[in-house]
Image (cartoon, helix red, strand yellow):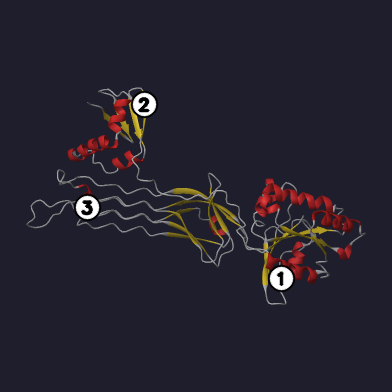
Amino acid sequence: MFTDYAKITVKSGDGGNGAMTFRREKYVAAGGPDGGDGGRGGNVYFTVDPDSNTLIDFRFKKNFKAQNGQNGSGNNCYGKSGEDLYIKVPLGTVVKDAETGKVVADLSNQGQTELILPGGRGGKGNTHFATSTRQAPRFAQDGEKGIEKELILELKLLADVGLLGYPNVGKSTFLSRVTSAKPKIADYHFTTLVPNLGVVKTEYGDSFVIADIPGIIEGASEGVGLGIQFLRHVERTRLLLHFIDVSGIEGRSPKEDFYKINEELRKYSEKLSKRKQIIVANKIDSMQNEERLKELEEIAKKEKLELFKISAATGEGINELMSYISKTLKQLPKEELIEIDEKVVYTLKETKNEFEIKRDNDEYIISGPAVERLMGRINIGDNESMHYFQKSLRELGIEEELKKKGIKEGDTVKILEWEFEWYD
């Protein structure tokens, strides 16, 4: 089954905790601190898998987590870093932040690997907190938590040429004739339910890829008929072949079909609507009259587009069209075709001394990265650790800020899940 969309939850590994240990050796009466640091949490990478062409695996597994770092231990032994997680995706996968919709990574190159979520940093052992006046610190630092995000995976096929048009205009028949692809073909609407790819090899030895996009209908840019899912596969193509049925069998208007499809392109992406386009008048072998063909010729002249008259069923006019496509592709640059307004980069919290104090009657609630790190290295039951805690509150400026906000003796100070009573 072809699947081109998936939503998954990904988390990088937590950092290991630093150790709170002391040297315990024979003939050493009072060994100093020797707690090792915790290991780094595993990173999360996305990497291109050359053997995959669908996102179907993500329908069954939606949660991914890198390994946590190990805790530090005595004798200054560092914890082992968590194993990195590599998530394999097909070539052409775009990773987006589910909350904002912004692009995180565009994996459109063979062998490409992108770091998506860095693992949490390991906590420091009590060795780091020893000073001349605090020679036996009975506290260490907790490891930093990893990052957890909900991500959207979108597969956008990598093709040079995209086939556009309403259902049943002959795109699949054309693809089967010019490539070795074997799409499902029948005389009814929406025979093609998933995009099909085919490789064209010209008589001069060069080749290019054609994508048969399921029939796009009015309202496709708003999701009608799974339109957005289909339109995303046109984004990467450098050249569009706009197929229009001129046989008159279904009573369609070439002019109406041409402008409606192009309006859907414009609504979906202004850049996509300006992509180079060739009009292909198909089914000329079964034309009832030439009125529709003349109507299409007038449109091509007005819009300054090339027009080719073919019959995908009999092969008439196809050689001339393929020759023109091959020459045109050599002149079109292989530019970055995905529109990225602002790329998202996930980073760990900076080690800045930032905090916020909110007052709720006689309760002062302190939050922010500074106090989260501080509480991660405090042993509430140890007097020396509490002295370090009070000293840190002064050094961070929290004590001064509390006084500015009017804290009085007996008021409650809340930091994370801990509550303290204030004394001057």
Q: Locate residue 157, reporting x and y percent.
A: 63, 60
Q: Label 1: which residue?
A: 179
Three-letter amino acid code of the residue under disc 2? Arg
Q: Nearer the viewer, residue 37 or 338?
A: 338
Return the disc, 2 or 1, that comes first in the chain's sequence.
Answer: 1
Check disc 2: other Cα within 10 Å, few if <14, some if 14-19, many if 20+.
Answer: some
Return the disc, 3 or 1, that comes first in the chain's sequence.
Answer: 3
Q: Residue furthest right?
A: 289
Image quadrant where residue 243 sits: bottom right
Residue at 32%, 31% (x, y): give it: 414
Image quadrant where residue 44 sits: bottom left
Three-letter amino acid code of the residue under disc 1? Thr
Check disc 3: other Cα within 10 Å, few if <14, some if 14-19, many if 20+.
Answer: many
Q: What separation in Å lies between label 2 and label 1 (alpha carbons)? A: 71 Å
Q: Label 2: which residue?
A: 359
Three-letter amino acid code of the residue under disc 3? Gly
For the residues labelled 3 and 1, say whether their Cβ atoms are less than 8 Å apart: no
Return the disc, 3 or 2, that comes first in the chain's sequence.
Answer: 3
Considering only vertical position in the picture, is 31 above or below 177?
above
Q: Secondary structure at mark 2?
A: strand
Q: Label 3: which residue?
A: 35
Quadrant for the C terminus in the image: top left
* In the displayed structure image, the side of residue 374 where residue 325 appears, left or right: right
Label 2 vs label 1, nearer the camera: 2
Asked if one can make out residue 261 in the rendered structure from this viewpoint, the answer is yes
Considering only vertical position in the picture, is 396 above or below 284?
above
Asked if one can make out residue 419 in the rendered structure from this viewpoint, the answer is no
Q: What separation in Å lies between label 3 and label 2 (alpha carbons)? A: 38 Å
Q: What separation in Å lies between label 3 and label 1 (alpha carbons)? A: 66 Å
Q: Locate residue 52, reporting x and y percent.
A: 56, 65
